[in-house]
Image (spheres, helix red, strand yellow):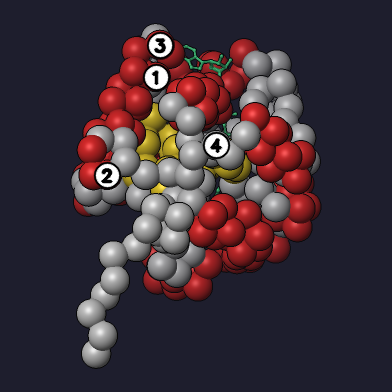
Amino acid sequence: MAPAMPQSQESAPAKGRFITFEGGEGSGKSTQVQRLLSKLAARGIETVATREPGGSPEAERLRRLLLSGAIAPLGADAEAIVFAAARIDHLDKTIRPALEEGCFVICDRFIDSTRAYQGATGKVDASLIADLEKVAAGETMPDLTIVLDVPVDIGLERARGRGEGADRFEQEQKAFHEAVRQSFLETAKSEPQRCIVIDATQPAEKIEQQIWRAVEKRFLKGDEDVGKPRRKAGASAAKAAKRPPRKKSGKIAP
Ligand code: Z5A
């Protein structure tokens, strides 16, 4: 067998990174996604910001159905399956292509939200959750998951403060949200190589600094320096134009 040839900078494989944000309602995910995007951009790294459910045109359609409560009457298993269907399209159309290009993909919610909202709340059997995760995400697991942890009352208060109507999940009882919070913490404990937990009751600036330290340490130091350099000023805007527009809150609009 011929020996492997060292690759030049130009032909080196793309080194995208997949970072997910998780946490309960009002934990500040959208706020911190925006702050991390700015920091990566300042470092000259091309990024794709996305969210779940949603993040591709078909998945955004499913998002509207899920959050309106239209799928709920079909039962919890059906709801979990629709979240997985949205995830399949999102990964195929948005996440994997961006990672292959070498971008940093920053995603507001991913598999841990299904584990928490559908699984840990006792609504869907753990084996179905695991099977759906395998089918939908497969090998595409986050390189880093940032869990923003906030007591349920504080998170719900913040979410209400935005003045938007409560969606299908925000209407659930406090015990449901407690189970969701514990699920995120348990996942982080069982997968410490992937997850970090940040106290999200701190001021946003402090949280931002802690996230940046974690991202720098894992991906941007010495040999680990990764990410596709921004090609030119218009490159990011062109990429953004292909994505659904963003709402004031920083979320991708339906
Ligand atoms: N879901 C599911 O069931 N299964 C799944 O597999 C997936 C999702 C993927 C999506 O809702 C829903 O789908 C979600 C779970 C379910 N359930 N709910 N509800 P969404 O995307 O519409 O909303 P969200 O993900 O729950 O996010 P959020 O409630 O909009 O909050 P956030 O993004 O975490 O927080 P934020 O918008 O950045 O901040 C909220 C407010 O707090 C805002 O006024 C900020 O200015 C303020 N804020 C932010 N940081 C701070 C700090 N540090 N201090 C004080 N105030 C702060």
> Does 67 sit left or right of 199 as displayed?
right
Residue carrying label 3: 205
Residue carrying label 4: 230
**Where residue 61 appears, x then y in whole percent?**
78, 52
**Where residue 168 appears, x then y in whole percent?**
66, 41
Mark 3 or mark 4: whose residue is earlier in sequence: 3
Q: Are marks 3 and 1 in contact (CB under 8 Å)?
A: yes
Tell me the SS state at disc 1.
helix
Write the residue at 66% across / 49% down.
54
Amino acid, disc 3: Glu
Write the residue at 73% across / 39% down.
238
> Does 42 sit left or right of 9 as displayed?
right
Looking at this view, is 245 or 188 the one in front? 245
Crowdedness near tag 4: few (<14), some (14–19) or many (≥20) residues, C-alpha within 10 Å: some
For residue 162, what is the image quadrant?
top right
Could you give the CA–CA distance between mark 3 and mark 2, rounded to whole angstroms?
26 Å
Residue carrying label 2: 224
Mark 1 or mark 2: whose residue is earlier in sequence: 1
**Where residue 184 appears, x then y in whole percent?**
35, 42
Above or below: residue 112 compared with residue 231: below
Looking at this view, is 239 or 148 the one in front? 239
Quadrant for the C terminus, please.
Answer: top right
Mark 4 or mark 2: whose residue is earlier in sequence: 2
Residue carrying label 1: 208
Could you give the CA–CA distance between mark 3 and mark 1, rounded to whole angstroms?
5 Å
Could you give the CA–CA distance between mark 3 and mark 4, rounded to whole angstroms?
25 Å
**Where residue 169 appears, x then y in whole percent?**
60, 40
Amino acid, disc 1: Glu
Tell me the SS state at disc 2.
helix
Tell me the SS state at disc 3.
helix
Mark 3 C-beta closer than 8 Å to ligand 1: no
> Does 171 sit left or right of 120 as displayed?
right
